[in-house]
Image (cartoon, rainbow, N blue to C red):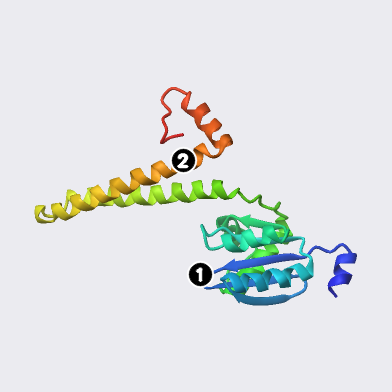
Amino acid sequence: MIKVLASCGKEINVGVDTGKAQLDIYVRPLEQAFSVPNNTAGIREAIRRLKAVHPTRIVIEATGRLELPFVIAAHKAKLPVCVANPIQIRRFAGATGQLAKSDQLDARMIAYYGKALAPEPTALKPEKARQVSDLLVRRNQLLDMRTMEKNRLSILPRTLHVSLNRHLKQLTTEIKRVEKQLDKRINQLPEWQNKMDQLMSVKGVGKVLA
């Protein structure tokens, strides 16, 4: 059946719904649905099964981090994986009237999205670039926590200010540590360093904004 589809030139679109513990996968138009644990062994099994069907594209929602191990494994296996914006998939589902919600239905909808819109494969960032992205996310998280603690200083009693100030000091120290790591990683990526230099040459643009 698979060979017939391939020889006829029919597209095979795969939808992957990503959860913390599980990947739900749907293969269209073979009407195959299966689930694997979202861990090394489960991803290895998913890649093995998907390579056998020679997919035109595999579409997976961007979740922030949960999809990354599968995406890296798919790239290593030379499978055409597309990381899609979840908002676009939700809008597509609404436009087609597919409002039911379950993991397998989500995977089926993602495969349908791949068939209808034919997104291009997503290039995988180099490992060092991914590290920079992770550090930027972590820096923003720390900044958010520091802002919340500063806001608490203005509303909580003075008896708690010692604790708040202690935590603020810790957060500031950690932010500086992450920023040093960022500088180190960016210096290891000439293309990023060049962009930084160009941006910072503009009046009013400092390192943080760049």
Query: Which residue occupies the foreground of this view, 175 or 112?
Result: 175
Q: Quadrant of residue 60?
A: bottom right
Above or below, 10 against 22 in this view is above
What is the crowding at mark 2: few (fewer than 14 residues within 10 Å), some, or many (at least 20)? few
- Please tell me which residue lies in front, 98 or 32: 32
Q: What's the residue at 57%, 59% (across, down)? A: 68
Dot 1 or dot 2: first in sequence order is: 1
The answer to whether residue 95 is seen in the rendering is no
Disc number lying in front (1 or 2): 2
Q: Which residue is mark 1?
A: 20
Which amino acid does the dot numbered 1 rest on?
Answer: Lys
Q: Assess disc 1: are there few (<14), some (14-19) or many (≥20) residues with their C-alpha within 10 Å of its C-alpha.
A: few
Q: Which mark is residue 177?
A: none
Image coordinates of residue 35 in percent, x first then y, are 62, 76
Q: Secondary structure at mark 2?
A: helix
What amino acid is labelled 2 in the image? Answer: Lys
Q: Position of residue 155 (x, y in %)?
A: 16, 52
Tell me which corner region of the image, top left, top right, bottom left or bottom right, holds residue 207. Answer: top left
Q: Check the image and report above or below for 163 versus 38.
A: above
Q: Give the number of callouts.
A: 2
Q: Which quadrant is home to the N terminus?
A: bottom right
Horizontally, is 31 left or right of 42 in the view? right
- Secondary element under disc 1, as helix, strand or loop, is loop
Percent across and percent down for residue 91 are 58, 58
Taking the spot 60% from the left edge, 48% from the top edge, the residue there is 126
Q: Which of the pair 133/27 is nearer the observer?
A: 133
As drawn, the label of residue 184 is 2
Residue 110 showing in the rendered view:
yes
Left or right position of 28 against 91: right
Residue positioned 48% across, 51% down in the render: 134
| Above or below for 133 versus 75 | above
> What's the CA distance linking mark 1 and mark 2?
31 Å
